[in-house]
Image (spheres, rainbow, N blue to C red):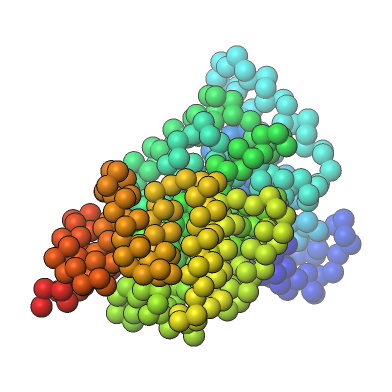
Amino acid sequence: MAQETHDALHTLDSHHAAPADAASSPINADAVREALDALYRLESRHIFATLVRLLGDFDVAEEALHDAFRAALEQWPSAGLPANPRAWLVSAGRFKAIDGMRRRARFDVLEDAGALADPVSEVAEPWDDEGVEDDRLRLIFTCCHPALSPDAQVALTLREVCGLATEEIASAFLTPAPTLAQRIVRAKAKIRDAHIPYQVPTHAELPDRLESVLRVVYLVFNEGYSASSGASLTRRDLSEEAIRLGRLLVELLPEPEAQGLLALMLLHESRRAARCSPTGELVLLDAQDRSLWNREQIAEGSALVEQSLKSRRFGPYTLQAAIAAVHANASATATDWGQIAAIYGVLLQIEPSPVIELNRAVAVAMRDGPAAGLALVDAILGRGDLTGYHLAHSVRADLCRRLGKSEEAIMAYQQALSLVRQEPERRFLEQRLRELTA
């Protein structure tokens, strides 16, 4: 149990000691509310995941979760604190949900009403904390099932695994709340109608299924680390949720690529405080105040990279994290661009991508000079790749500027400006353009 919850419950229990298998004596209602608030913050998604497994429906489980907390608020002041609050809440929520289904079944003529007997038979199962941890993993894999669209996977994961409100998710991704709500409703219906199993994939299925989970977490982090549009450069809430998911995956399923993704997110997040000026302006990597970088996150991320690399079962997330680690552990003037370019070369072999090519071109430019980098960027744009990607034109503009090709730089900056959607990046490009045209 998380420390905050433990502290709150310990406060309740300290004056009302009880045997391990019994509830404590009656307790103050305000103290119960405080403990339940802590439980809800830190344990509600664990409890929800178990209720989804036991009840077989997202919406029924959500209603059962809230019914259980209401029941605890009513009963714990007089009955005392249960020895295992999480188990009590799961059992209470489950009983209330089944009772509600049975009452509705008396009035509804449903062919499958008999299926309601199945959950009842499991009520007496012994409590298994390890099984609860499995429930969290089951929930993640269900929300990220490849039968769902990528957008639905992201929305459902943030809603059901992280517990974010629909309005919060809609705001983060600049999507109208009704549209986002319908996306979640359709995803749940798809899971129900397609009988998508609520389970951890088999060992044979794991590589492909894990990839979709990692992709969802990475998409959430990317939107938080560098918002695709809007007034802010970053969205800290999304970055933190992605890192929380990454930690959960490593805790429950310590695969090398899960470790690599967590490392990548930590190493990037370590630079957050230095990426913007006090007025919200974009600060490029080489101009950042590295004393602001979070050394604890760098140390943790670097250790995870090393651990994943040693497994020899790493993939693209670990390689990207290795590049981030080179940056994080060097001064601006002592960055090993040769090593970075070499890692990008390996990354291109296992995951060919024009964006990775672009990043490698930047590293080559830093290692061999802007002309070498410009030739690579022109080759990418020349074959029609990344023509609608503002950063490709921004990189080309910067390389032309460094080579003294002012007219080409101006044209490239203008092209980047026509594509950019984020205000801090727009202001940065406009400033560079003003410098060239002054």
In the image, residue 156 above or below residue 244: above
Residue 430 lies, in percent from the top left, at 18, 69
Of 381 and 269, the residue lying toward us: 381
Instruction: Judge from the rendering whether residue 220 lies leftward or rightward of residue 112; answer left or right.
Output: left
Residue 326 lies, in percent from the top left, at 55, 70
Q: Does residue 422 appear anywhere in the picture?
A: no
Q: Going by the picture, which residue comes out furthest to the left? A: 438
Instruction: Judge from the rendering whether residue 127 lies leftward or rightward of residue 411; answer left or right.
Output: right
Kindly identify the residue that appears in the image at 60 percent across and 22 percent down. Answer: 106
Kindly identify the residue that appears in the image at 27 percent across and 68 percent down. Answer: 398
Kindly identify the residue that appears in the image at 29 percent across and 79 percent down. Answer: 279
In the image, residue 190 above or below residue 294: above
Which corner quadrant holds the C terminus? bottom left
In the image, residue 332 above or below residue 364: below
Residue 216 lies, in percent from the top left, at 51, 47
Residue 357 lies, in percent from the top left, at 41, 53
Of 171 and 288, the residue lying toward us: 288
User: Which quadrant of the figure has residue 183?
Assistant: top left
Which corner quadrant holds the N terminus? bottom right
Q: Does residue 258 appear anywhere in the picture?
A: yes
Instruction: Judge from the rendering whether residue 371 lies leftward or rightward of residue 163; answer left or right.
Output: left
Instruction: Judge from the rendering whether residue 319 lies leftward or rightward of residue 353; answer left or right.
Output: right
User: Which quadrant of the figure has residue 118?
Assistant: top right
Kindly identify the residue that appears in the image at 20 percent across and 60 percent down. Answer: 412
In the image, residue 337 above or below residue 122: below
Q: How many marks?
A: 0
